[in-house]
Image: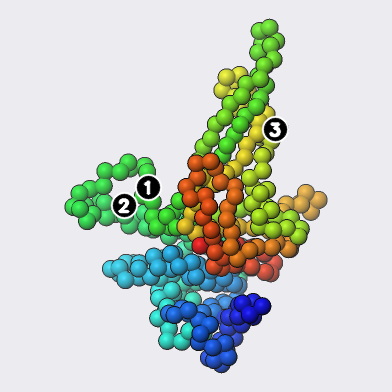
Amino acid sequence: MDVLMTVRKIASICTMGTNASTLEKEIGPEQFPVNEHYFGLVNFGNTCYCNSVLQALYFCRPFREKVLAYKVQPRKKESLLTCLADLFNSIATQKKKVGVIPPKKFISRLRKENELFDNYMQQDAHEFLNYLLNTIADLLQEEKKQENQNGKLQNGSLDLQEPDKPDLTWVHEIFQKSPLEMEMPLTFQCVTITLLCFFLLFKVSSKDEDFLDLSVDVEQNTSITHCLRGFSNTETLCSECKYYCEQCRSKQEGQKRMRVKKLPMILALHLKRFKYMDQLHRYTKLSYRVVFPLELRLFNTSGDATNPDRMYDLVAVVVHCGRWVNVRLFLE
């Protein structure tokens, strides 16, 4: 109960900037980790989708440390990453532990770079996060490419990496270094023209896919564990989703399932709060109750997964309410 009350009080700090110092005294300095800051971000009309994700990323310590380290590097031309580094540095160097900061420079740059966010409409927090992480990764890859072309590697040699294979960045190391293994035990029936012979052919194939987060379906009164179980349920490939058989050169029914092959440093879970309704001809939000724990161990891992017993601690939750609803959990 004490923990819940503390969380509620800290959350209230982010929305009560003028009373921040009073609330800090009320909560007590012992409740705040050393050198940690809790700052709310000013909403510029419709930027709650952005502010909530930025706050969650700030409290993902590996990501924050990389962004702050980027801040002290030789000054580069302004980009979304430099603006983010300036914002994180502004929060981290505040004298007070609580307060409010206007992310004006970052929002201005975001609207300049992507017209999707250059309006006063409500936006999707999930789309913004993916755009931000992909943009940062692209910027880092382009910088590394320029360094390689100019021969400025630390060892004095040019990078002999394949030209079509981009470098992995710290964004990939934190979030995406976690391919999914798609196990597809395909049980299908081949039909031969000669003799009209029917026989069963069993085949198992797999492929790896990278991801920045896990998107899971939600149901009414469910839990994260149940959502993850549904994510890894066996799916039957039929109708338009049939598997193409190379031997009989036709599409056949089969089955597939998803397993996590490599666990990421930061596990980001995306709850799919939108569902297309045929009768309405549009997507509608699902305001379902989904229970999530403070600690989580993934059970849907592949047989050769590295560190499958890793325990994740919940560090941030994004619940974006309004016309658009999206929920994300960040576990470290």
Q: Residue furthest top?
A: 195
Check the image and report above or below for 113 versus 28: above
Hey, what amino acid is under mark 3? Cys
Q: Mark 1: few, some, or many residues within 10 Å (few <14, many ≥20)?
A: few
Q: Residue furthest right?
A: 279
Q: Position of residue 84 (x, y in %)?
A: 43, 70
Check the image and report above or below for 25 versus 192: below
Q: Which residue is mark 2?
A: 145
Label 2 and label 1: CA atoms lie apart by 8 Å
**Residue at 28% in and 68% down:** 74
**Residue at 56% in and 65% down:** 314
Hey, what amino acid is under mark 1? Pro
Which quadrant would the N terminus be assigned to in this image? Answer: bottom right
Q: Which residue is mark 3?
A: 238
Label 3 and label 1: CA atoms lie apart by 36 Å
Rendered image coloring scheme? rainbow
